[in-house]
Image (spheres, grey):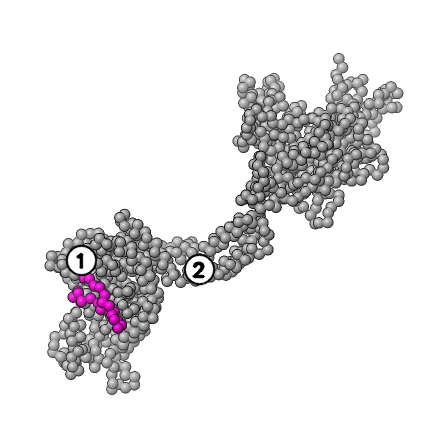
Amino acid sequence: MFSTKQETNMAPHVNLGALLQQEFQEDVAHREDGLCVVGIFGKSSTQTGPLKGSLINTLADKHIFSLFGESEEGDSADSHIEAFYDQENRVLYLLLSSVCDSRQLLRACRSLSAGISHSDAHDFWKGLDRQHCLHLLYMFSVCHVLLLVQPSQTFDVTHDRLFRALDALRQKALPLIRAAIKDCPVSKEWKLNCRPCPPRLLFVFQMTATLKVSGNGSDSGGNPDKPKKHSPRRRLQHALEDQIYRIFRKSRVLTNQSSNCLFTVPANQAFVYVIPAADKDPVGTLLGQLRSNCILSEQDTTPVLSGPRRYQQMRRSARQPSGESTSMLMGSQLVDCSLKEFLWQHVELVLTKKGFDDSVGRNPQPSHFELPTYTKWVQVASRLYQVLITNTDEEIAELATKVQSQVKVLDGFLDADAKFSENRCQKALPLAHSAYQSNLPHNYTTTVHKNQLAQALRVYSQHARGVAFQRYALQLHEDCYKFWTNGHQLCEERSLTDQHCVHKFHLLPQPGETPDMDHNPPIMNHNSRGRSTSSCNCGRKQAPREDPFDIQAANYDFYQILEEKCCGKLERIALPVFQPSTPDPAPASDQVQRLPSEGSGDAEKLKEPSTAQSHTPGDTSLSLALSLGQSTDSLGPYGDGDGAENQVQPKRPSLIDRQPSTVEYLPGMTHSACPKGLLPKFSSWSLLKLGSAKSYNCHTGLEQPSFLPGSSFLLPWDLVIRSRSEEDAGLMEPLDGGSSSWPAPNKSLVGKRGSAGGLGRGRRRDDMARVFVGFEYEDSRGRRFISSGPDKIVKALGPGGAKDPATRVLNTDMPLYVPSPSQGRGLKPHFAQLARLFIVVPDAPLEITLNPQVQPGPPPCPIFHPEQTEVVLPPDGFWVLRFPYSYATERGPCFPPKENQPLSNYKVLRGILRATTANPVPQ
């Protein structure tokens, strides 16, 4: 608690906030006396003892502040005010400690983290500066006299800018301060001007050891017989007074009317005091003091007074005639006064209620003055302390918030670095905007936007400097983004052939909605301006097509339009599609269990060679098995039991026999990784019958348009059909063109004419069956050809048709894309895509099973297949399988290969056709 010491009437210094909150009981004799408030602020040097604290020790003749400082550990670097109340002399000292002091500066440096950015560090220091200014504004609002302490003998001109900033802040905050003290028991002038009087500002300088003067102080300019009237220190004080007054008058910090100024300086009194430097020769100092005392004793027997009365005695002696003034002269020079005498001449004007009359000019206006009691001053100071510094009182929290919002007026005066940086960055912004907009198309994509933005940032970084760099860089980001999205953003959607839409950003029309170009954003369909020529399902009619953006337009809608004109009446094998049982079916969710791996299909085929399905069962298989009363060991090759146990268990239901879902549909195409038991709403494949087997003429080839000359012939696939008289009659033997279908070298074929054990002339001529197969490729210009191998085109020079057998194309992986035989003039290569597979099945006891599997990309791209994985082609038919134009999964499309990607990753897996005999087993 703040308490007085009865023996000295002094109290230790306390924090101002604690002083204002506690109830201090004054002596009855001094309760109604006035109170003079003296504020001390400024800078301190790197010396051990605090200069400002030692001044109060000198003024109070008491050891109040420690000369070596207190413990710094855990102390904050924030500004704070300490108070010391000299109740005997009716003076309250307020000492401001801020970042201008070396001790506080050291604490602030320690509080900074090591990895802080330049901008954050600047904000930290400027926050301390604003805090310092608010504390200064508080002291200028509650003090009568202010001491500005400077640790050198030169005036710091940065104070001029500081005082102009404080004056501007005070003018902005004046209405708010009036509202805060309107209920305080003070005069109307105090409430109007928000201060007891225009405070008088005094300057205290510390003379350093570099400025040495002679011991006797005689500086006569070469004439020792004519000594100077004033000592060098006093002449320095006069020079500093003139310099300070001119600077403040020039910058209009000081004007003629003192009531309009932030502070005043006296016109006829000294307002600068220079503290002499400590003499390094203590013996010489003692001798000098002894000599001065002896001279005074010899010249005048009048007792020498101390304190304020000594200063009054000096003033009276100075007004006496020259013959009587010798008592105050030392070597024909005026004796310099002490710091307390210097201050007390101004304090007495306050305590005697005379006030300060510092206005100048022809018509000086008197300024207001009020000497409050301690109780009244505490009431006003508490309200201002809540508004300007602490902001803890809920009643005036709104006023405090408004005052804090006015602090930004200080930036223009104090933050010269930020002001320079702002000007520099503002000049760099137009250059960066020009760099961004250079060589830009009217509409462009995100990639172009990012590249141009990077170029703009490079130009910006070449010219922008300072703490505002990051803030204006973010503004550059926002400006460029606004420019891009304001009518210059290109549609980011890419077609299934990996070409982006050429329209600016737009919306897609909803079902039944017509395009609206005037809408913002416009409503229209995607368009990449890419056109190609494609054939219909059967291949007999060609038409141009737009570059598709969705899988239905690519694999279904285009062919449906041509089907109405060409192949709508042809016989076909319908592939299963989704049949809804509800009016609003939903696409399947992503939570359906998928394949554990992409390559599990091959292992599955090895485990179940006789089944028609090659899918791995999901959770639906497990739930169905459990519902039939089976255990998990009865799941065939998927269970954990051995082969013997699996054979005796009942066979699980095949996926083909199950009813597919009628509530959820597959949003993409069927492939090896899609959910089981789901079907798409449309089929991306087509299987048509062009006619009977005789409708194909092997001498003329396919009679369809746009085939390259000599490349429209199908490849022959000769299959051996064994006679019924043989022992293995009726057994189904695969005739896929492999080694099992052909005789071993140097071994005669059984039943061949002239061979042992043959049937001779009675041998039936249907032992050999010829199937015709053709893989048709079509490029974007509609040019078509049949391939006889992965890198070869069929070329039939004569009327005999193609001579190459089909075994090569059936026993290898055929490429999905091949280079077009007729490239354009550009550097970009053109590819031809596998479009159709023609199969001529003869009228023979054969079963040709179709099982297409396409991998349109490198792993882990899934394998695509029709909705019915295996289709048996009836005999005596000319069939054509149309492959999808584009491939897409639920995650997105599988784009065609680029020019630098190997084509071997895009392929149709071998085993697309399998042939078996269809003879019945003899009874």
The residue tagged 1 is: 374
Q: In front: 556, or 105? A: 556
Q: Is residue 727 visible?
A: yes
Residue at 30%, 71% (x, y): give it: 245
| Residue 688, quarter of picture | top right
Residue that sits furthest to the top in the current view: 923
The residue type indicated by label 1 comes to: Tyr
Whether residues under marks 1 and 2 lie with C-beta atoms below 8 angstroms apart, the answer is no
In magenta segment, residue 361: yes
Q: Name the main secondary structure of what is drawn in magenta.
A: loop
Label 1, label 2: how far apart the Cα atoms are? 47 Å
In magenta segment, residue 428: no
Task: Determine whether the residue tagged by mark 1 lies in a helix, strand or loop.
Answer: helix
Question: What is the x, y in percent for residue 571?
Answer: 72, 26
Question: What is the x, y in percent for residue 176?
Answer: 29, 55
The image quadrant where one finds the C terminus is: top right
Please give the range of residues in magenta.
351-376
Residue at 18%, 52% (x, y): give it: 23
Q: Tell me if mark 1 has few (under 14), some (14-19) or many (20+) residues whose alpha carbon lies within 10 angstroms of its own.
A: many
The residue tagged 2 is: 422
Residue at 61%, 19% (x, y): give it: 651
Question: What is the x, y in percent for residue 61?
Answer: 18, 65
Asked whether, in this view, residue 633 is left or right of residue 713, the answer is left
